Amino acid sequence: MSATSSVAQLGDSPRRRYYAGRDLRRVRDVGDLRAMAHRRMPRFVLEYLEGGAEREQSLQRDRAAYDEWRFVPRQLVDVSRRSLAAQLLGRMAPMPLVVAPTGLNGLFVHHGDVELAKASARAGVPFVQSTMSNDRMEDVGRVPGLRHWWQLYLFGGEEVWQELLRRADAAGCEALLLTTNAQIFGRREWSARTRVGRSRPSLQTIVDAALHPRWIASTLVAGGGLPAFANVVDFVPRDQRGFFETAFWIRDHQPQSMDWASVARIRQRWRRPFLLKGLLHEDDVRRALDAGVDGIVLGTHGGRQLDSCVSALDVLPAARRIVGGRMAIYASGGVRCGTDLLKALALGADAVLAGRAPLYGLCAAGAAGAAKALELLHGEAHDALGLLGANSVGELGPRFLARLGATAALPATICG
Ligand SMILES: Cc1cc2nc3c(=O)[nH]c(=O)nc-3n(C[C@H](O)[C@H](O)[C@H](O)COP(=O)(O)O)c2cc1C
């Protein structure tokens, strides 16, 4: 796997490659974990992991928005005692990062949710378990030291979410995230092209999967076939409980009538921290304040839902101006390195959600790989904080940033 070309190269010289072997000690950044994941996973799994909706403009914007902001560092600051530690919903964490909810983690490795939870616990950051996860929430909740949050998709009748929240309560989930931007499933054509019809893998997909024996061993053989949707399968009719059938049945039974009244009902029922995930519009940020939620996650669902959207980063400064200190704002989408984390914080986020970055690690080497991704993000952000001339995340602000395309010296280009 080659790196993208750099100004440090003359054509393809010196020849640069991400590390794609099996030795985690040789991994230098999330790009290496991604290369390892690409070697290990079959094409249909990679399309599910990497892909976005339609022309993938939202997906692309999530990354491009980070690239548009550049640092303006301070020098000669004593940064010998700096720390990334921050409050997340009232409790300290070693860094302001949350592992995002991702469905179908069992497709990457057997017990993918438990593995990701173990890595999160090791890093001291919360893990949000998806409604479409493959391990039972009670099993994930038993991971020692885990800050366990639950992500809710509405489907079926009210009794379904009532029951899921009862279980999340009993499993000790600390917070609830309601996903607001996925009641209509995004049109992910690249992923769909790996199948014939809705649920049958194409012949090419089957042949390609057969050529990935390590994935077959760690997923299909270890799990005895494709994973079940352990937390929701009981709500699905018996003849629809196959892997693809369940996914499509749930998709077909998501109420497109979900609205602010639904939020109010859930708020009434769930008394612990409650966040809305997937907002982008300023008016929705205001409504979230009125709805009495504890926080919002700005983002595009990793570019997998509505295409051609702005990114979380684009709307973050305005959202912060609206909210002030009244509720938490998290940014999701495009975080691949420590400097991304610092940029989001400087633009007003309390924390970021990282989806694909820890998943690359999970695909590469299970819990150890995901832990490596989180360790790398922490190490990079810690170094960058010092290089920026700051000692804590509380010191970060727009004064450390300039937007490309305008001259850094012009104050008007510096947000805030
Ligand atoms: C493979 C995959 C599965 C996802 N599944 C869910 C999900 O079940 N529920 C949800 O709210 N968001 C889901 N998301 C969106 C993530 O929670 C998060 O918003 C997104 O991944 C952030 O972008 P990033 O991957 O660039 O970090 C998923 C994302 C990916 C990549």
Image (cartoon, rainbow, N blue to C red):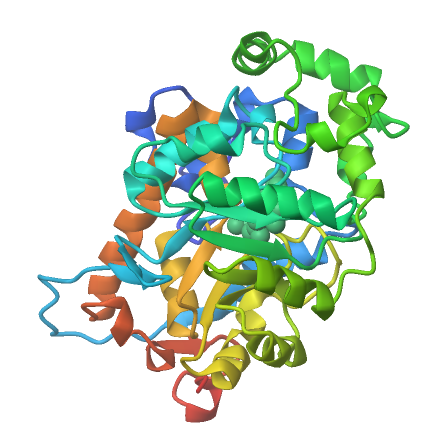
In the rendered image, the quadrant that contains the C terminus is: bottom left
Toward the viewer: 24 or 114?
A: 114
Q: Count all numbered tags in the image, as a single digit.
A: 0
Q: Is residue 48 visible?
A: yes
Toward the viewer: 357 or 161?
A: 161
Measured as percent of width and height from the top left, residue 126 is found at 39, 47
Q: Is residue 17 visible?
A: no
> Is 96 left, or right, of 356 in this rendering?
left
Residue at 52%, 61% in the rendered image: 274
Toward the viewer: 374 or 271?
A: 271
Up-down: is 272 above or below 304?
below
Residue at 41%, 92% in the rendered image: 411
Measured as percent of width and height from the top left, residue 151 is found at 57, 48
Up-down: is 59 above or below 386?
above
> Is 38 left, or right, of 281 in this rendering?
left
Toward the viewer: 386 or 121?
A: 121
Measured as percent of width and height from the top left, residue 344 is found at 43, 66
Measured as percent of width and height from the top left, residue 403 is found at 47, 77
Snapshot quadrant of residue 26 = top left
> Is 271 left, or right, of 42 in this rendering?
left
Residue at 46%, 84% in the rendered image: 415
